[in-house]
Structure formats: C-alpha cells, structure tokens
Image (cartoon, coloured by chain):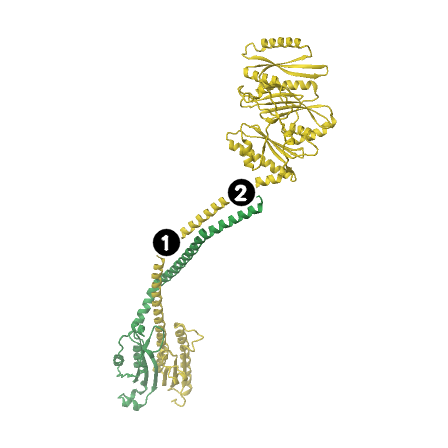
Amino acid sequence: MSTSFELKEWHGKEIFCWYQEEAKKYKGKTETFVEIEKNRIILSEILLEKKKPQICAVFSASYKEELMESSHMSEAFVVKKGKMIGSSESLQGTLNCLLEFMAQELKKVYRQVYLITPSGTFLYKILNFPDMPDADMKAALKAEIQGFEESKLKEEPSVLKSWCLGKVERKEGMNTNFLLLGIPRESIFSYIEILGESKISMSGFSTPQMLYFYYLNHQTQEKKQSFIFVELTDYSLRISFFQNGVLAFIRYISLPKWTEENRFVRNVSSQIHHSILYLNQQYPDANLDKFILFNRTSVGKITESIASELEFNIENFDLTPFVAYPDDLSSRLEEYHISPVAPLYAYNLLAKNEAIPLPIQEFDIRIQAKARIKAAIIFLVLWALVLGFSYYQIQDVVNAQKKILDATEDIKQKQKAVKQELDTINTEKALYLARYNALKKILHAKSRWLPLFYNAIEAKMSSMLFTRLTISPFVTKEEQQNAQIDSILLKPARIEIECKVRQPYAASLKLFEDFKKKFQDLYDIVAEKADSAAKIDPQTKKEEMNFSLTIKLKKGQQQ
Amino acid sequence: MKKPIVFYFVIAILFLSMNGGAYLFLFAPCLEQYVKQQDDIDAKKRQKKSITSNQEEIHKYRMIEKSYLENNAFYEKWVRKNFSSTEIKVYLHELGKKVGLKIEPEDKTEVPEDPSLLPPTTEVVVHAFATYEINAFFTPEQLKNYLYSVVDNQEKLFLLRTLEAAAVSTDALTSNNIEVSDKDKYMKVRMILDYVYFLPAEEEKKE
C-alpha cells in the first residue's frame, strides 16, 4: 500500500531560488511539492511559468497523531485547478488513500513527484474510468462497488461509499477517478459527502510557500511590503519573513507537548523573539510593515496573549471575510469542525490594510526593553539579597567579636594584679640590687689592702726593719681642699713602706730588692683580684679603685 | 524607557541609592562597631601579651628569689637601728684586751649624723660610718691579731682607713711602761678605723 518516490528536502528560502532557476529551464513543466508537518500534509502542484508560477492543485490534510479516533474531526481536502475536488476527516487510512491516489495520478502525468506516504490500514479501491457516457460509468461504478463489498467488506461492519475525485487530463483524453472507501463511521461519510457536494471554491494556500506564490501573483510593483507571517499550530511554529515582497527567511519549529496554556504562550513568544533577534542580525535595515499571526491552535485568544508578551501589535489572520461558504454549510461549519485553511490573507494585506513601516530593530528594541526591565528588577533584587547577606555576614563577625570581648572581660583586673606584683618585685629587686652593690663595694674596700699589710708585717717579723709603714686612702689634692670625704671609704689605697736593714749595705740592698719584688708581685695579684671581684672596668680602675704602692729604702740608716 | 540610556541612568540611580542607603543605615554603623570592637580586642591582646611577659618576669624572679633574699639577709646583718658610738668603743677596747693591750679608741667621727648629709651611695641604700682613731704600741704579732679581729669579724663591719706604723724611740716606750729591751719589737701604730653600718629600710623610706 505504501508508495515510494524520489524525495527531496526543501527549506524556506531555497524554494525561491529553486523557482528562479527551474522556471527558466523547465518552462511549462509541473512540479509537485509535499509539505509534511507533524500533524498536516500539504501537497501541491506548481506549473512553472517564466513570469510567475501557477498553482494547479493543492491537497491539504491535517490530523492529530495521538487522537486518531474517528470521532475527532479534522480536515482533509483536495483542490484541483481552483476547485475543491474532495475532502475527508483526517483519519490515517483516509489520508493514505488520498495521498496514494494523488501520487498515482500525478505520476501518470508529471515527470517527478516528491512525496512521502505514511502507511496505514484502510480499505479502499481506486477506480479509473476512461471517458464514457454517464449511464455506463454509473453501471461500471455500481459493479465495482458490489465487487469490492463482496471481496473486502464481507466481515466488516463498515459501509462503503464511493467518492468521485474528479477528472484527470491525460494524453489520450480525460479519465475519471473514483475512490472507494470502506470506513466504519457514518459521520465520516456524511462529512465527506457534504464537502464533496458543497464544491467550495478556494483559491487559497495554507503554507508560507504557497503564500509566497500567491503573494507573487498579487503583489503590485509599486508597493512591496515586508512582513512576518507566523503560522502556529498546537505542535509547530512556522515563521516566515518577507522582505519587500521576497520570501527571505523561514523557520520551522516543532513545539513540545503542552498542558498549560501560559507555558505554551511563553514558549511560542520566546521562539518568535529569537527569530526576530536573528532577523535583526541578518537584515538590520529591514522595515517591518506587519506582523501577522495565523492561529491554528486550540487556544482561542493566543494572538492577544502573544501580543501582550511581546508588547507588539499583532494582527490576527482571519479568513472569514474572504471565504464564501454556501449557506447550508456555513451554518454547520462548527458542527463539522471545519476550519478552512485559506491564506487569502496576502490579498487582504495588500488590499485593505495600510502599511505601517516599523523597523525590525525598533520592534526588537521593544522586546529588549521589556527584557531589560525584567533583568534590572532581577538584578536589583539579587543585589539587595547580596547586600542583605553581606550585612548578615558582618553582623556575624561583629557578634563573634562581642563574644571574644565578653570572654576576655576579666583581663584588666588580672593585668592590674600582675602588674602590681611585678612592680613590687621590681622595687624589691632594685632595692636588693642596690643594697648588694653598695655592700659589695664596701666589702671590696675592706679587703683591698689587708693581704699586703699582712705580708709587710710578716716581713718585719723576719729580717726587715720598717721605719715607717703607711696605708691611707688615695685622696687627690683637690679632694683634700674641698674636704670631699663622702666617698672616702671607697677610695683606692696608697701604701708607703720605708725600711732599713740590719745587715751590711750590699746584702741589705739585695734583701730590700728581693722584698720589693716579692711585694710588688703580690700587690699586682691582689690588685687584679680585688678589681675583678668588684667587677671594676680595667679602663676606669684608676679612677675607681686602685692601689698606689711606694717602697723606698731610707738612706743613711743602715747599720 | 524606550531610550536605553535613560533606562540605564534610572537603574544606575536606583543601584547607587540602594548601595548608599545600605551603607548609611546598615554597613556604616556595623563597620563603626566593628572597628571599635577590634580596637578593644587588640588592646586586650596587648594586655594579654603584657601580662604574659610580666608573668614570665615574675616567674624568673621567683626562680632566683632565694639568692636575692640571701644577699639581702647578708645586708640586713649590717643594719643598725640604734647606733651607739660608745658600744663600738667598748668593743674595740675589749678587743685590745684580748691581744694584751689597753686600747682607748678616740671618737673621730667627722661626718654629721644628719641623714641629709650622708653620702648618697645609691638612691635607696644609705650607709653611715663612725670613725675611731687608735694610738698604741704593737708588736707585729699583736698588730696582726688585732687587725684580724677588727677587719675579719662577721658581726661588725670595720674598714681601715689609715694605718701608720713607725719605729719608736726608747723614750716613748719608757713613758708607756714598756721594757726597752723589746724596743725593736714594738711599732708605734696609729690607725683610723671606720665603722660602717646601714640604715634600716624604714629610715631610708623616710629620707
């Protein structure tokens, strides 16, 4: 049941380029485009003309994948040469039939068909009758229906309906095609029947590509506008930008499933905003005349919501003034869930609305301004939090300081006690040291000459005869004159020894010299020891403590 | 708000006023308190350091306190509360008796007892002295013993200021009832002794 074809993939701007080149090469040829979306398929024939393309046929079918119940109505229709030749509920099987039929038909006539056909299970039969009288055709059809019922629908509770799809021009003449469908729902047949019988005339397009071609057909040379056309469904978002009448940018985005309307609006707004930012980068000098939203979602007032989110005046794409339904059908449009997709808006745009030039940049600035305010508020709130946190941290530090201070409150008392104790000790120590030093000096003075004196006395006891032995403080003349006797206790000692000997002179002299030498040696030792004991600086010992020794032999006294 | 510069200006003003307000009403008092408390903490740290250092000094002193006290006890030994010149004279006389001589010390104190005229040996320690002159005939042995007793005794602190030992004439010995045959043994000795003593601490303080 599936049919494979050569498949090419196209994206927005490429279509325009393709047209420019292909139209020259294959003038008079027809190409078929199939646009497949998540929940819709659009199939269209384009006749390549040098000046402008001609739309031969458009087939559009929309459906909801997850809601394939037959009770859910969606639309599927075929338009051929400006006339709708068929329509159906978007059941998978119906769609398959239609697609396959279209593909087969087109393949008979045209060089190439780009098509994808989804697979499905559906009972159908395509009948292709050559041109014949009506009575013969009715008889042939009746026979085919009967045969189909007998062969395929024996066990099925379905009802078979035939659907005349219209006549197809072929080289040898005209062929009439019929579709036999076995569908288990009465409502579907009635729906198809109504649409089939209504023969609504729709010279419209439902995709940006078709819109573009339509636009080329209707655009006047004097007034070429730039506009953004957004087509929004529950599952997809298509943004097209026309710059001075030329399709410049198309972006197709699949939207995730949504349950909350607000989230959906925010998501769509954000995607549109990103596209505008991109457009602003790519076409910085472009002016935007219109922003058009084609709402095909289940949300009623989505245009207003998005306009409020983006802070921009968005026009709703409203078909009703441009679609003429027969009276009996228009009263039942809602009942049959018919929402015709006919982008007559381009015509409407040119004919009725005034152009309001608005730079894309300006538009972007509005969005940016709003974003800036939000960002500023968030920044200020965050900064306030930072300040609050800083304050809290500083308070923490200050409290920690307080704790430290509280813990060390008794230091002052302790310090006072310790200092007092130290002062007492230092006073005592100073007193002790002063006493010790004073005592040391006096004791030093006490012992300064005594050994010498002993030695002298011992010498007398043996052989020497002293005529005079004097020990006195070494007081200078100035001190004597000024009667400075205060420090007399600590003065250096002056020792004078006069002596005579009893032996003959020569021996006496030797004895004296021996004594003198011995005494002086002892004197040196004692002087040094005494100074050292008193810790007298050798440099200053002359002034401080010293010994003056004079030993002389009295002349003329020898015996 | 369409012009970004106006927007940024308003936001900048808001931002600055927010910061200014926060500084004036929140941070400035906090910082002031912080600085004050930090100063207090630093002061307490210094106090603690000072206490530690003082305690170390006290500890060091306690370790060697005994030697200080011993030195001081040695000093205290020479302290005289009620000085009596006669007592010293008697002492010197008694000492003479021991070496077999009759010695009569003569009071030669020249320095007045007025504390203000006392020699300022140190700021806190004041010592005083009394001077005695002794004129006598000594044999070398007697002289040695006498001096040894005077100078080397542990109870009283004597300093020998002047000592003159000279040969004596026979007349001098005779007049002093000393046998002339021992003439060579005797020396005529004139010595000036200083009896040194320290004033009690209470008196030092008064001074």
| The one of A333 and A408 positioned closer to us in this rendering | A333
Chain painted yellow: A
| Secondary structure of residue under mark 1 | helix
Q: Which mark is residue A493?
A: none
Q: Label 2 crowding class (10 Å Cα cut-off): few <14, some 14-19, many 20+?
A: some
Quarter holding residue A106: top right
The percent coordinates of residue B20 (x first, y second) are 49, 51
The percent coordinates of residue A227 (x first, y second) are 63, 34
Mark positioned earlier in the residue sequence (1 or 2)? 2
Tag count = 2
Q: Are discs 1 and 2 both within one chain?
A: yes
Quarter holding residue A244: top right
Left or right: B162 in relation to A165: left
Give the amino acid at mark 1.
Asp
Circle 1 chain: A
The percent coordinates of residue A149 (x first, y second) are 58, 10
Hue used for the chain lettered B: green
Check disc 2 and report the residue beneath it. Answer: A373
| The one of A462 and A332 positioned closer to us in this rendering | A332
| The one of A200 and A4 positioned closer to us in this rendering | A200
Check disc 1 and report the residue beneath it. Answer: A406
Against A335, residue A345 (above or below) is below
